[in-house]
Image (tube, rainbow, N blue to C red):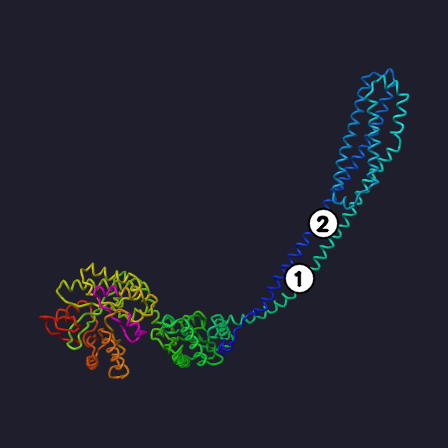
Amino acid sequence: MVVGSNMKNKVTPTGDSHSSVAKYIRSIGRHYVTAVVVMTVLIGATFVTVKVALYRHSLQQNISYLIGRQFIRFQQLANQTRAVMRASTDPNMPEYIVRPMVEDVQKAIDDIRAMNVQLHDLNNEVEANLLERLNGPDPAAEKLRLELDGRLEDFLQRAERVVSTKLQERRERYSFWGPIDFAVSSDSLLMRQFSALIESAHDRSDVSIDHTRLISAVLLSLTAATLILATLILFIPLLVKLRTEHRRTLDFEIKLTHLAHTDTLTGLGNRSSFNDALNGLFGSLERTGAGFSMLLVDLDHFKSTNDSFGHPAGDAVLAHVAAALQKTFRAGDVVARLGGDEFAALLPGISDAATLEGIAGRAVAAIATECHFEGRLLPVSASIGGAVVPGHASDEPTLMRIADLALYAAKAKRNTAVIFDEASFAQRLEQNRLAAALAFAADRDEFVVYYQQKVDLLTSRHLGFEALVRWRHPQLGILPPGRFLPLMEGHLIQAMTRCIVNTVGRDLKAWKAAGLRAGSVAINLPEALLVSQDGYDLIAAAVKANGLDWRDFAIEVTEDVFLNRGAEQIAETISRFRKHGVSVSLDDFGTGFASLVHLRDFPFDELKIDRSFVAEIGKDIRSEQIIRAIIDLARNLGKRCVAEGIEEEAQRGFLMTAGCDIGQGYLFAKPEPASAAVERLAQNPLAVRGKSGRITQGPGEPAFQGAA
């Protein structure tokens, strides 16, 4: 079957589903952010709780440590005070021994009081701690601390009185002071209070740790619950939805892969599918030896259709061609659009060149049928090149190359089919060699100018010349334009035109110096030179360099200038020529896409009837009617009319009867080199065109004898 012929409906992705998933993901994203914030807060709260608990525990540890040190210092103070008292009772004890003991007692008193200050500050920090606030106050511990502080301060004051008195007073009062002052202070009650306070601090620390453990457990549980809920509510449904969407995507990708091998405009296969089919046929050739054929199809003048009628019209032409090819080929053949205006077909089982030629001819005829678009009849034709496997090639690169050679040969003729043969291959090689040599032809001054005479049809008097290019090939000699112009593009045509203008300028200068009146010489300027300043500057330079008059040149343009994107600029350039008196001819009229609007607005002086119409005079009444219409149109527009390609007297007679005044063709003179043109000018006078446009004989000039 024809590849892509059953792909009538375009497969598109389920947009609603994608939109739904996108909205769902955005919704989940918002909830996910909320869940993340909640979990972050919970984790932060857990961290803060642990940090606060550790700090409180550290404070309690410091309190316990200081109380323990204070208790040890208290015991040292009690012992040191008793030692001072006992030393004071010994009359033989020198004072210098007692004095350091007194200083130690005083230092112990100061240390204990400093520890009291530190304990007070630590207790204040503990009371400010958040967990301590949650635990609530402990009246018993507070009472115990106050009682201990009171008893300890009382003891310190008693010790201070002991060490602050003189030695003699201590000796006198020891029998009474010692037992009374220290019996109570050093008893077990104070020690029990120290022990109880230390135990209370440890208990409060344990309570804080228990509270921290509980709060942290609650916070971590909430974090875990949030994560579980987020998983159940958000992620599991998302995974289910994504799985469903993944299945839809797989289905769509399968359809998309199929469409990737189909040309969306024509419904045919595309280049990718064509290559796959071609590889498959070569694989079958290796396995079974089954041959096949390939045709390459290229549309004629497709760019002109796009430029003239727009891309929608071009699309209509492509669809028309696709339909024509589908009708021409069998169901098992592979037809594809390779890109642009290029098509191709693979015909399994066809390995005979004669059979392939017949099929290709039917395809050309099918494509050339009428194509209507928006009430217009679009011109459609194609060139087809073909080759057979294994007769012409046994591998893909060779097949593509020789099919392309055949296509190139077909495009030289247009609207035809060519199946590869050795002759076309040799022709292509020759054209390749010519194309390579053309790149240097202008630099080597190999382009020469031939001049074809324009005459008054009534009197056969000389009016001027048309400059026609020839190529003096180093090996092949003089080549006509048909051999090399189709091979030239862009800058090569511009370079060739410069050579022609310069040559014509030099020839006109020489003719004038010899006293010859050549009339105007018409030069065909390409669009690329007219759409810019280059064309005007080229003629201006030739006029100045050779001391010529602007009227010595005439310009010929084709109807294609109307369709050029720079048509306005071209019209402006043409107007500049006409202001200098340069005559402008519209060449090959009737073969392009000119409309009456173009003729009305475009500045020109002559209409040239194309030789294809003149050749049909006496053979095709329709061509004669077209010629009469063109002549009448030119007369009504106030323009001159020139017929080219006149070869017979009958043609001349018809044209004169129809009202055409000027002609050129083999009946009068063939294109000839400058030397022959000089001889013709020396023998024949120049007809002078008066103000009314009527052609008259120049004064004192001999009669002209026309040459066939």
Q: Position of residue 533 (x, y in %)?
A: 29, 61
Residues packed near mark 2 inside 10 Å, few (<14), some (14 to 19) or many (20 plus): many
Q: Is residue 507 magenta?
A: no
Q: Disc number at residue 33?
A: none
> Which residue is at 77% across, 32% downward?
115
Residue ranking furthest to the left: 700
Q: Which of marks 2 and 1 is nearer the N terminus?
A: 2
> Which residue is at 46% across, 73% downward?
265
Q: Nearer the viewer, residue 274 or 168?
A: 168
Residues packed near mark 1 inside 10 Å, few (<14), some (14 to 19) or many (20 plus): some
Q: Name the residue under label 2.
A: 46
Residue range in magenta is 575-601
Mark 2 or mark 1: which is in front?
2
Residue 330 lies left or right of residue 507; in this view the side is right
Residue 359 lies left or right of residue 682; in this view the side is right
Q: In this view, does 476 lie above or below 107?
A: below
Q: Position of residue 403 (x, y in %)?
A: 41, 73
Q: Which of 633 and 155 is in front in this view?
A: 155
Q: In this view, does 125 lie above or below 17?
A: above
Q: Is residue 589 magenta?
A: yes
Q: Name the residue under label 1.
A: 235
